[in-house]
């Protein structure tokens, strides 16, 4: 049984929504398990739509320079666990304040460096390794690398305890009606991506052939995905809409959804295009066929990461080919046509992956037992 711990999570928003999305989900999960969280974030804007109601026992504090330590009240609520998300380097004045506490009462926080998610082999090797702090007020303390991942030898994936239950009670037609989306027996496809070069080809394909022999309703996430789709129509509509004569594709542009509602979107669709990190994990839990637009890195390191993910998934060849086309840089690539049997294979693959991953400890559970062992 864990004591009620005081957590401090530090988050820097680099771009997009994943940094704050992951940190918020972690904070809310810890709070739901009875812990108290201070979430220090340099740009909390996205929380206004991601989690408008906030969460009991999560205090969001602006990460200013210098840090307003008074907001934390460290003297009465010292930090038990310090999480720096994605190597963001905790504010030095916070470390100094923890060191003062340490000399006063002998307690120091367990310092966790929460890393990015990957299925690559190095994750198992590096997970839970300490790194000794060499200098400064926290000299000789350890900072621990904590890697989310897909195997029991990693930190696992974020998965709040009530998820499966909530999912089993979900009523897709009712949810669609609430969104004002008519339910006409179309195949529903969600789209959350950056600007994939294969997007025009995918839209053309869906418009011409539909999916699984049915017309398609594409539900496009707000932001970059919706700009990318609109850009294709601006550039190309005259080229293909007029000549093809087909009209299998209809499109709904979504508003920004709360994280909960974003889950509902994934659960209500037959195929989910997701990106980054957090939406990928949510799509895995949805257990529906998915296509991942991986966050591109300059040195193309993301391609190894993509392969490792597809290996972990035990992806059938059609799913691999689709991912390779979807993640190729540059424009003008054709996404392979998705046939009925492909979609069935993808469903089997994702259903099995969900089942395997559900049997593993979730990230919060792993983190809590790691902290209990290392305090
Ligand atoms: O937005 P992302 O691409 O984020 C990230 C960041 O770019 C980050 O810097 C990078 O390191 C990382 O990818 C790999 O994708 P992600 O991770 O899926 O985060 C999106 C979050 O936004 C996720 O928590 C779901 C949430 N979301 C909603 O809650 N409602 C919405 O309507 C949408 C579109 C997203």
Image: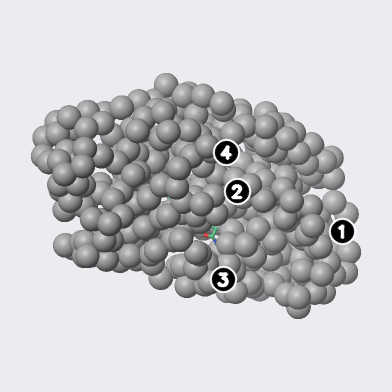
Residue 160 is marked as: 2
Query: What residue does disc 3 label?
Result: 256
Q: CA distance from mark 4 to mark 1?
A: 37 Å
The mark that comes first in sequence, 3 or 1, is 1
Residue at 72% of width from left, 48% of height from top?
164
Q: Position of residue 229 (x, y in %)?
A: 59, 66
Query: What residue does disc 1 label?
Result: 214
The mark that comes first in sequence, 1 or 2, is 2
Judged by depth in the image, the label closer to the viewer, 1 or 2, is: 2
Which of the 4 image quarters holds residue 72?
Answer: bottom left
Badge 2 element: loop
The mark that comes first in sequence, 3 or 2, is 2
The mark that comes first in sequence, 4 or 2, is 2
The mark that comes first in sequence, 4 or 1, is 1
Disc 4 and disc 2 in contact, CB within 8 angstroms: yes
Judging depth in this view, the residue of 314 and 321 nearest the camera is 314
Judging depth in this view, the residue of 255 and 361 nearest the camera is 361
Disc 3 and disc 2 in contact, CB within 8 angstroms: no
Judging depth in this view, the residue of 132 and 97 nearest the camera is 97
Badge 3 element: loop
Query: What residue does disc 4 label?
Result: 362
Q: Is residue 156 visible?
A: yes
Badge 1 element: loop
Residue at 44% of width from left, 61% of height from top?
58
């Amino acid at each position: 049984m864990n004591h009620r711990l005081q957590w401090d999570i530090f988050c820097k928003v680099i771009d997009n929504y994943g940094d704050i999305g992951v940190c918020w989900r972690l904070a809310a999960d810890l709070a739901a398990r009875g812990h108290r969280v201070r979430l220090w974030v340099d740009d909390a804007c996205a929380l206004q739509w991601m989690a408008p109601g906030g969460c009991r026992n999560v205090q969001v504090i602006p990460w200013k320079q210098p840090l307003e330590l008074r907001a934390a009240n460290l003297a009465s609520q010292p930090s038990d666990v310090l999480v720096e998300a994605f190597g963001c380097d905790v504010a030095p004045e916070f470390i100094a304040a923890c060191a003062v506490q340490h000399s006063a009462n002998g307690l120091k926080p367990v310092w966790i460096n929460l890393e990015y998610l990957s299925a690559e082999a190095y994750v198992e090797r590096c997970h839970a390794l300490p790194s000794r702090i060499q200098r400064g007020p926290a000299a000789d303390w350890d900072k621990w690398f904590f890697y989310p991942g897909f195997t029991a030898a990693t930190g696992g994936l974020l998965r709040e305890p009530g998820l499966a239950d909530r999912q089993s009670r979900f009523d897709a037609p009712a949810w669609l009606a609430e969104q004002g989306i008519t339910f006409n027996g179309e195949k529903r496809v969600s789209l959350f991506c950056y600007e994939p070069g294969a997007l025009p080809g995918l839209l053309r394909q869906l418009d011409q052939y539909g999916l699984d022999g049915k017309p398609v309703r594409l539900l496009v996430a707000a932001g970059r995905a919706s700009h990318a789709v609109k850009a294709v129509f601006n550039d190309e509509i005259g080229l293909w809409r007029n000549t093809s004569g087909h009209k299998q594709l209809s499109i709904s542009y979504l508003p920004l959804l709360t994280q909960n509602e974003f889950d509902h979107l994934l659960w209500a669709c037959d195929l989910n295009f997701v990106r980054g990190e957090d939406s990928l994990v949510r799509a895995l839990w949805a257990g529906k066929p998915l296509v991942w637009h991986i966050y591109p890195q300059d040195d193309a390191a993301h391609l190894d990461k993509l392969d490792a993910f597809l290996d972990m998934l035990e992806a059938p060849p059609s799913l691999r080919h689709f991912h390779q086309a979807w993640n190729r840089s540059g424009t003008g690539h054709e996404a392979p046509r998705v046939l009925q049997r492909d979609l069935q294979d993808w469903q089997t693959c994702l259903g099995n992956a969900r089942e395997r991953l559900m049997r593993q400890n979730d990230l919060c559970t792993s983190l809590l037992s790691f902290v209990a062992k290392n305090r």
